[in-house]
Amino acid sequence: MALRSISQPQTSCSAFAALLKPFFNIFLVSLLVLTIFRLSLLLAFGHWESLSGHASDLIRAFGLGIRFDAKLLSILYFPLIIPLWVFAFRGRNGAPLWLKGLYRWWGFAVLLLLIVVGIVDIFYFQFFKSHIDILAFNILYDSNGEVLHSLWSDFPVVWVGVGVVASIAGLVLLTRLLVRRSCPLCRRTSVLTRTLIMLVLTVLLGLLARGTLLDRPLGPSHTVVSQEPFINQLPMNAPLALQYAYKHYSASIATPTVENQLRNGGFSTLEEAVGTYLRHPVDAENPLLALIDTTGYNPLLDSLPPHVVVLQMESLGEYYMGFNRGNFNLLGALVDELPHLIHFPNFFSCMNNTPATLEGMLFGSPFHHLGVSTQYPKPLPYSAPWTYKRKNYETWYITGQRLGWRNLDLYLAAGKGFDHIEGDNALREFDPEAHVGEWGVHDASLFKRIWSVLQSSPSPQFIYGMSISHHTPYDAATLEPFADSLQIPDSVTRLYKTGPALARRSFLAFRYAANQLGLFLRKLRQSPLGQRTIVAITGDHTLRQILNVGDDPMANYAVPLLLYIPEQYMPKCKVDTTTFSSQNDIFPTLYHLSLSRANYLHVGCNLLDSIPSHRPPAAVYTNTFAMNRHAFAQWTTDYYATRDTVTGRLHHDAHPTPTELALGAWGRSYMAVMGCFIARELENASEVEGWLK
């Protein structure tokens, strides 16, 4: 009887019909409103002479914009399907008036939100040339009312208010019309039919809310669709821009000050912190000035400055490199290049995520996400690109990554010293045969582009390249021709903490990236360019998703540093590759290799210095621990240990030795001093720039 009742037509089901059509009406009108705002943005701020050759990009931007709009509306209107589910099973002659009122006023509230935020976004764009972003939250710190005064004097606040009032009146009438009529096709349907309709609708809304069937939901990183920056602003809608801005704001650091950085590091004075870091007394009047170092005079570097390439390789861990043997060939062409490289195996990344490592290497930043904080537009004259730019280098940032990811496009362009910033769209244009994956353009095209820049540039070039291919979902594995012959030994499979298929894809993606790196280095070494190009290669962090490696810091945090140095630039002293060091030491080393009489920020030490005491005293993993061949100090948990120099094992000391405590103090001083320097620079950039000239 139950089955028969489900299949029988229900004539008294107009409650379902009375709610379904208003749902679609409100949804589609909201979609239209967002599209109108997008079109308004294009008409108001688009420069047609620069957009005329980008018709296909504009179509892509508007198509992607509809997906962003549908994502937003699916989330905002999802609660309205709950009554529809109820009336899919309950027969009722007409929907209750209060429920139709709920649909009407819910739609009214959402539409009003879209209009108000959209209007604010248009005026924000007029001033800042971007959607609402993290800078909008500076109004919260407007203690003297300057921002509010500027808004009142520079924008038609009264007319905007009149427009909002008119919109409210219009929306009252519009939403009344949108909920009046029911869906005629749904007035005579069975419970089964209505259930199927609701299943399809629910799944559809879920997919639209996610925005994509790929691993990562639709987000800001997907908005970069063109080489024309303005077009990349079009896909995002105002409410989502506000949401992402708030997310960045919530996660961003507070504005750093010298006082809070010293307090966080456990130091009472700046003199104490800088002296601990530099390991010698400093001037009490301006201790930060002691952080400015100068490279020695080298006539070769003045007459024949080398190109400098720094490669930040995605998840290139030292632990993975150690597996390479026999048919478990993880390095490909890179294995033949290792004899031509200086390899530092006891080397640690800045942090365990890509943007923080990038900031740590380029700027010496101990902060996790300066790029998505309210400080992102401020120039950093002490950055590595600026150090090279001051010595007449042309500077490049090249990646296969989407530049919209983590605010990279705006952050790196805002006074960080790069002349050129190229992402996935630039690589696609440069290499029409580029392989594109979840995160952007794969590494083969990155190395092609770097080679092209070097080959076509008679003047010295500084290139910072960031790879993406060894990243989940490891789709670069499909590009690896070695896939069928890769044999993973039992000693490795026993360490799996994920499925074997995912692990295999990770190994193949790792091999793809390493092989492409090796092919680039071979081509460079065998060409005349190889005689005047210095290359530094490191991983942005290790990969801890695939294998269970326990608590060993080397397995968890060590990444390789590989240096390719042409013979004429090679230091004459013996190189100690067993030194414990970290990514803050990369650029000081490169400065001494490539720049003559250059001022730079002492973010680390010269690994190739002829005087052992001038080399790094330890590796430092930002905000967590310091480690050398004899000791380990993790100040965040007060864990101190002696390191066995033969086995590498750590032996916890309940009562830390003076050596271990000194190691911890040095690590804390690095965090405090770099934080203080950045705080001073953000407060007074011209003062810091004067120190560096």
Image (cartoon, rainbow, N blue to C red):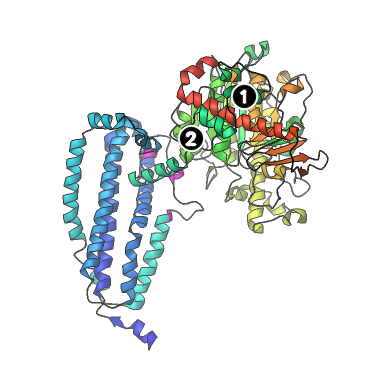
Q: Is residue 344 left or right of residue 91?
A: right
Tell me the quarter of the picture where residue 450 sits: top right
The image shows residue 337, relative to residue 109, as above or below, that is: above
Q: Residue furthest bottom?
A: 1
Magenta region: which residues? 210-234
Which residue is denoted by mark 2 in the rendering? 371
Residue at point 77%, 35% (across, down): 629
Q: Is residue 103 left or right of residue 599?
A: left
Any magenta on residue 214? Answer: yes
Provide residue 643's location: percent of width, then percent of height: 78, 39
Secondary structure state at the residue bearing disc 2 = helix
Provide residue 511's location: percent of width, then percent of height: 67, 45
Which residue is denoted by mark 1 in the rendering? 272
Provide residue 637's location: percent of width, then percent of height: 64, 43
Sequence-wise, the earlier of marks 1 and 2 is 1
Q: Residue furthest right?
A: 646
Residue at point 38%, 49% (across, down): 68
> Which kind of residue does numbered mark 1 sit on?
Glu
Secondary structure state at the residue bearing disc 1 = helix
Q: Is residue 250 or residue 273 the one in the foreground?
A: 273
Provide residue 125's location: percent of width, then percent of height: 32, 35
Label 2 neighbourhood size at 10 Å, few (<14), some (14-19), many (20+)?
Answer: many
Residue at point 78%, 28% (across, down): 576
> Which kind of residue does numbered mark 2 sit on?
Gly
Residue 449 visible here? no
- Alpha carbon separation for disc pair 1 and 2: 29 Å
Residue 356 visible here? yes
